[in-house]
Amino acid sequence: MRPITVPFFISHQGCPNQCVFCNQVRIAGTGGEFPDGDAIRAKVSAYRGTSGGNPVEVAFFGGSFTAIPFDYQERLLGALHPLRERGEVSGIRISTRPDAIDGEHLAWLRGMGVATVEIGIQSMDESVLERSGRGHTAAQVVTACRLVKKAGMVLGAQLMPGLPGDTPALSMTSLHEVLALNPDFLRIYPTLVIAETRLAELYRAGEYVPLSLAGAVTLCKMLLRAALAAEVPVIRIGLQPTAELDCEGSVLAGPYHPAFRQLVEGELCLDLCRKLTTGLPRGMGVTVFCAPARVSDVAGQRRYNLEALRRDGVHVTSIIADPDLSHHDLRVEAGSVSRRGNLLV
C-alpha cells in the first residue's frame, strides 16, 4: 500500500543562502518553525486516524535538513523514535542540499529512521546554478547522489526547468545527467516568479523571462516522457496549490496552474491520439481506449483534447476504459481500422 505522508515544513531552515527563486513562506504557507515533540506526535496521530490502514511516513520539507543544527535534527527525529518502535510510522524522508551531505551523516540519519533523501538539484548546468544563487556545483550533486545510494537510502531528485539562463535543451541535458545517477524518483517544478524574491526583481527589470504556460507544459511533457522511459517515476510536476500561492500577488509570472500535471499528461495523450488518427477520413467517428486512470487525460482538462482533435477533423465519439491496457498505451478504433500506440515512444 502507498504510504500516507505527514508533512512538516521547515521552510528555509538550514539553507546557507537565498536562491533567487525562493520564498518558502509563500510557497509552503509556513514560516518554518521547528515543531516540538508533542506537535509531531499529534499530527501523526491525526493522519493515522484517516489513513485507512495505509502505512504512514513523516517528511520534512522546505529546508535543508542536514544543514540545520545537529541538536535540532536529533530532536526532530528522536520525537519519532517511539512511533517507529510501535510501528506507527513506517519511515522518514528529508529534503536537503547537495553540499550538505556526507557519508557519516547519512549513516547516522539512517540509524535514526530516515529512509529517503530528496536532493534539491534544480539544474546540472554550472551557469544556471550560479545565476540562480544555488551556491553548489554540479560535481557536488554527483557526489551527494552517489553517497545516498551507497548508504542504501532512497534517492529523490528535484529539478527546476526555466531558471535564469536555462533553455529547454539545457533542461533535457540536466535530466539525462540526473537519470544517470540512478534516482528512485523525481519531482519537476517549472520555475515561477514568486513575490519578494530576487527573481521577482529580475523579472520586473526585464532581466528574466519566465516560461509560458504552454512552453512549460511542452517542456515538462518531454521531461516526463524521458523519465518514464528510463523507468524513473515522477511523483510531482508543478508546485502543489496552496492558499498562499493562490493568493493574488503571490505568483507574479510563470507557468502556475493548479492542475499543471494534468495539462502535461493531457498533452502526452493528445500527441499520441493525433499520431494514431493520422490519415483517417475527416469527421470519421473514432473510439479511444485507454487504461481506466487515463480517461480524463485523454479527454484533456475541460475536454481540451477532444476540441483540439475536432479542429483536426477527428471526431472522438467515446473514450472507453480498458483495464487490459497499460497506463501508457492507447488504442483507437475507427470503422475497420484499429491502431495502438505507447505514450513513451
Image (tube, grey):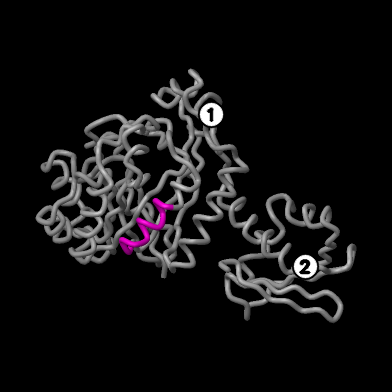
Q: Is residue 185 visible?
A: yes
Q: Is residue 150 above or below residue 16?
A: below
Q: Which mark is residue 247?
A: 1
Identify the element where label 2 is drawn: loop
Tell me, yes or no, whether the highlighted magenta stretch contains residue 174: yes
Q: Nearer the viewer, residue 174 or 95?
A: 174
Judge by depth and name the residue closer to the eye, 54 or 147.
Answer: 147
Q: Which percent across, then down, holds residue 136?
A: 25, 40
- Position of 233 with respect to 134 (left or right) is right
Closer to the camera: disc 1 or disc 2?
2
Query: Label 2 belongs to which residue?
Result: 277
Up/down of 294 relative to 335, above or below? above
Tag 1 near tag 2, CB within 8 Å: no
121 vs 116: above or below = above
Q: Which residues are magenta?
A: 173-182
Disc 1 to disc 2, C-alpha distance: 42 Å
